[in-house]
Image (cartoon, helix red, strand yellow):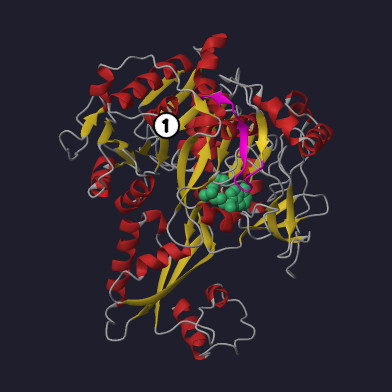
Amino acid sequence: MSEPTVSETRLFQPTADFASQSHLGSLEAYRALHKRSIDDPEGFWSEVASELTWMKPWDKVLDESDAPFYKWFTGGKTNITVNCIDRHVEAGNGDRVAIYWEGEPGDSRVLTYADMQKEVSRFANALKAMGIGKGDSVAVYLPMVPELAIATLACARIGAVHSVIFAGFSAESIKDRVLDASSKAVITSDGTYRRGKELLTKNIVDEGIADCECIKNVLVVQRHPEKEPFAHGWVEGRDHWYHDLAKNASDECAPEEMDAEDMLFLLYTSGSTGKPKGIMHTTGGYMVGTYLTSKLTFDLKPEKDVYWCTADVGWITGHSYIVYGPMQNGVSQVMYEGAPNYPAENRFWEIVEKYKVSIFYTAPTAIRAFMKWGDDHVTKHDLSSLRLLGTVGEPINPEAWMWYHRMIGAEKCPIVDTWWQTETGGHMLTPLPGAIATKPGSATVPFPGIDAAVLDEDGNEVERGILAIRKPWPSMLRGIYGDPERYKSTYWCKWDGKYYFPGDGAIKDEDGYFWITGRVDDVVNVSGHRIGTAELESVFVEHPAVAESAVIGVPHEIKGQGLVAFVIIRTGAEGDEDVMRKELTSMVDSKIGKFARPEKIIFSGDLPKTRSGKIMRRLLRDIAEDRPLGNISTLADPSVVEILKDKIKG
Ligand code: WT7
């Protein structure tokens, strides 16, 4: 804990203009609300929950009797889709646009809240026609088309548990997730576009579920109903075109009454060991958490804002801040199918101008890519509609923050740097715009209801240490599907169940601002995507020639972090390194997905190990980043270090 603390001293006060119109217009208002929320969490959260529609009110706000298996709003009954859709239609806002959808090739669709009510109901009835009902698990492998939002909401409408799988995952990843969740059906599309190329999603699904007996039906959305479908396989009896089922499906579907603690969805994420874990979120707490965080963090004004979150619904950001949070607030939003640089590097700014986007939420990795592509792509567009900017997914470097502030925000838009996780369901640390002055690179302060601290291993508060969350909060995960022990040991054991352990390092500065320093476990954040080093290592050792491997994260100019793999080949199995590298890369593609490809694969005869045989990853990171190595005398064979140093350079 001797590394230097924060050197960034710039402070950006909210402008008077923004503050005067914002939900929480002053630091005092934030402080009062935060204090209240910590002194009386049940009172605070029950007031928030009362802003939403319930079929039956809850008996108890928080049940701690089986901690850390906390329960929220027990006895309450609701359906989250009522709050996302019906409430707005009933309030007379059915004509408000819910989704301005933009396809990568330039096609577009507009859906109002009234349209969403019909489309979600129709989709829900199609699912029912396939025999899907309350409690059934449904996998969703769709590109960023409106049906992705519609399908997830349709599952929620009938009480089915959705398990959305990001459409960049490989067939084998689909298989792992479908089997773990025992999904009964998959919803996919015939295809999509990515950087102008066709991506045949249906065929990837076919390969993934070939041996999944639990899957009884596949529902296929046609990407271009008016054109020839993309090339696709077909299994009679199992596969159905959505447009065929939709013809006979009513556009009315009563919402299933759900218990506050009924599961809403599963979303798989990587941890430091083993296979990805199915994070469980339930109905009531997640609903309340995503509603309030969307409203306050983005200062949503549904009558006038056009909101755009550039994430994919396949990740938690899209679940909470495309589907559930913004829609509960009844705001209009943009949804975009494709890449930021297709057909050209100005695509995002063209979309901002076209739809007059007022709130824009993206990832630091994207911001760094825009910086690299050059200011000309930005300056040729009118971005004056923007009033608030956000970032998510990884620490943002102050240089990228300043560029975002100047080039995109015209030095007037507050930037909300939101720290949270798949597990937390919603924002945990974030400036509330209008109330909290920002510092480039800091996620600033805890959201109301969140009690955060920086601790050492023993639970003492320190300036630089490990981030910890003191109390449960409504949108927290309810566990890891099928593995309650792993839930306890991963998140609640570090400080004897007194704190939630998110796995991130942090600094708390003299103003009480938090600075996330990155993961403290073996999880690497590549372009905002979590990848467990153990997952990649287990892919490599499946290759018959590989004896052992160690994967580490290293800083990467655009991606934030990149992966470097060290691979030991079995004696006698040595061959051409380039051939081997290609084979290993294609194994990563097929077992995880292209986004998990390492930047470098280094073959070596040995790895630095302690005398007890443990690979010294910290030393591998020092070697990869060309840092001074310090004492290496505890190594079983110190000579491997020099060999590896040469290999890294060459
Ligand atoms: C991990 C969670 C949060 C939704 C997208 C990623 C890192 C996330 C920030 C931020 C610094 C951040 C953390 C966290 N992270 N947001 N604003 N500043 N780091 O969700 O895949 O569950 O990853 O992303 O390391 O633990 P996820």
For the magenta stretch, what is the residue range?
A: 64-79
**Secondary-structure class at tag 1:** helix
Assign the N terminus to one quadrant of the image: bottom right
- What is the three-letter code of the residue carrying label 1? Thr
Q: In percent of the image, x 60 and y 54: which residue is there?
A: 491
| Residue 519 lies in quadrant | bottom right
Question: How far across and down, in percent of the image, does residue 384 sit?
Answer: 61, 28
Q: Provide residue 280's location: percent of width, then percent of height.
A: 50, 43
Which sits in the foreground, 411 or 427? 427
Closer to the camera in the image, 252 or 189:
252
- Residue 594 lies, with reference to residue 109, above or below; the image says below
The verdict on residue 78 being magenta is yes
- Image position of 178 with respect to 490: above or below: above
Image coordinates of residue 349 in percent, x first then y, are: 51, 35
Let me know if residue 2 appears in the view: yes
State whether residue 396 appears in this view: no
**Would residue 94 appear left or right of 148 to someone viewing this image?**
right
